Image (spheres, rainbow, N blue to C red):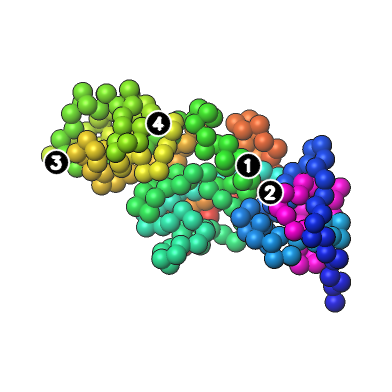
């Protein structure tokens, strides 16, 4: 039977150079999200150096001994990144209150706990980046990163090329200001048109809201690129890990150690 660590209700480990918040450390170990980690701490399930934490403000280093429910914390993984081809009809969330199917329910168990870099809404499809590093996900979501997100978009209506070009100056819809959007008409066929749309900001449902405001409702939306990463020929429902060397070159992140046998990337095809 595991001994219960003594309580330290008022005390938390002092900050140290090179340290990180305990919630982030738990998330990097693949146990939970930061939000779940904060809840676990409030429930008294997390101890550092034998003392039960009462605050998520604690900072830890590699020298600290961390336990959850009395069990030592697994070693944190190096940063890993996957390309995933999301199909329409999946929520980009770990838990959906309405019980709709989610992206994360479809992933292979060997990937462990991962989070998405941004989201694609329920009816959108295409490239979704997944990572085990929450800090990396947040960094890549910021417009300051400068990464262009490119989409193939089908709209209903006859597209006015001049109004399309004006989107490069930005647009305000229902009080929300959207930045520059580059949109090119690829093909108009009857009452439908296919566009290539590129943007950096990527606010919630931005493309759908902007084209709805222009009178051209979106009937299909496929993300084909996120920065240097392309959807390419990745099959629908498949997840493919980005090789560690590529992660390092593109992101400046430390790649994962190669698996036994020299295999680092894997692909899972849909069932």
Closer mark to the observer between disc 3 and disc 1: 1
State how far apart marks 4 and 1 are (Cα). 22 Å
Of mark 3 and mark 1, the one earlier in the sequence is: 1
Q: Kindly identify which numbered label has been placed on residue 191.
A: 3
Residue 61 quadrant:
top right
State how far apart marks 1 and 2 are (Cα). 8 Å
Residue found 25% across the figure and 28% down from its top: 164
Q: Relative to the observer, which residue lies in front, 113 or 268?
A: 113
Q: Relative to the observer, which residue lies in front, 248 or 44?
A: 44
Q: Relative to the observer, which residue lies in front, 214 or 102?
A: 214
Write the start and end of the magenta stretch as one range.
53-77
Residue 33 is situated, as x and y percent measured from the top left of the image, at 62, 55
Residue at the far front in the pictured view: 10
Q: Say which residue label 1 marks.
A: 135
In the rendered view, tell whether residue 70 sits above or below residue 203.
below
Of mark 2 and mark 3, the one earlier in the sequence is: 2
Binning the other alpha carbons within 10 Å of mark 4 as few (below 14), some (14 to 19) or many (20 upward) gives: many
Q: Say which residue label 2 marks.
A: 24
Question: In the figure, is residue 120 to the left or right of 187?
Answer: right
Image marks 4 and 2: residues in contact by CB distance under 8 Å: no
Residue 46 is situated, as x and y percent measured from the top left of the image, at 76, 61
Question: In the figure, is residue 130 to the left or right of 125?
Answer: right
Of mark 1 and mark 2, the one earlier in the sequence is: 2
Image marks 1 and 2: residues in contact by CB distance under 8 Å: yes
Q: Is residue 68 visible?
A: yes
Residue found 86% across the figure and 71% down from its top: 3
Binning the other alpha carbons within 10 Å of mark 2 as few (below 14), some (14 to 19) or many (20 upward) gives: many
**Does dot 1 land on a helix, a strand or a loop?**
helix
Residue 182 magenta? no
């Amino acid at each position: 039977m595991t001994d219960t660590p003594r309580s330290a209700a008022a005390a938390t480990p002092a900050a140290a150079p090179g340290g990180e918040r305990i919630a982030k450390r738990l998330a990097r170990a693949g146990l939970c999200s930061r939000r779940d980690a904060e809840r676990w701490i409030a429930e008294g399930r997390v101890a550092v150096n034998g003392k039960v934490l009462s605050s998520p403000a604690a900072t830890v280093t590699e020298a600290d001994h961390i336990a959850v429910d009395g069990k030592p914390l697994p070693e944190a993984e190096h940063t890993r990144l996957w390309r995933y081809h999301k199909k329409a009809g999946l929520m980009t969330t770990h838990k959906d209150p309405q019980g709709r199917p989610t992206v994360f329910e479809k992933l292979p168990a060997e990937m462990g706990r991962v989070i998405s870099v941004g989201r694609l809404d329920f009816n959108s499809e295409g490239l979704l980046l997944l990572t085990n590093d929450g800090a990396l996900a947040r960094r890549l979501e910021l417009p300051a990163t400068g990464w262009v997100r490119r989409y193939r978009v089908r709209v209903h209506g006859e597209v006015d090329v001049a109004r399309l070009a004006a989107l490069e100056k930005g647009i305000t819809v229902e009080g929300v200001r959207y930045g520059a959007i580059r949109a090119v008409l690829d093909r108009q066929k009857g009452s439908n048109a296919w566009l290539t749309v590129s943007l950096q900001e990527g606010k919630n449902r931005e493309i759908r809201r902007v084209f709805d405001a222009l009178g051209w409702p979106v009937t299909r939306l496929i993300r084909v690129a996120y920065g240097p990463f392309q959807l390419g020929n990745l099959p629908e429902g498949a997840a493919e890990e980005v090789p560690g060397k590529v992660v390092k070159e593109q992101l400046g992140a430390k790649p994962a150690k190669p698996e036994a046998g020299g295999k680092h990337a894997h692909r899972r095809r849909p069932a």
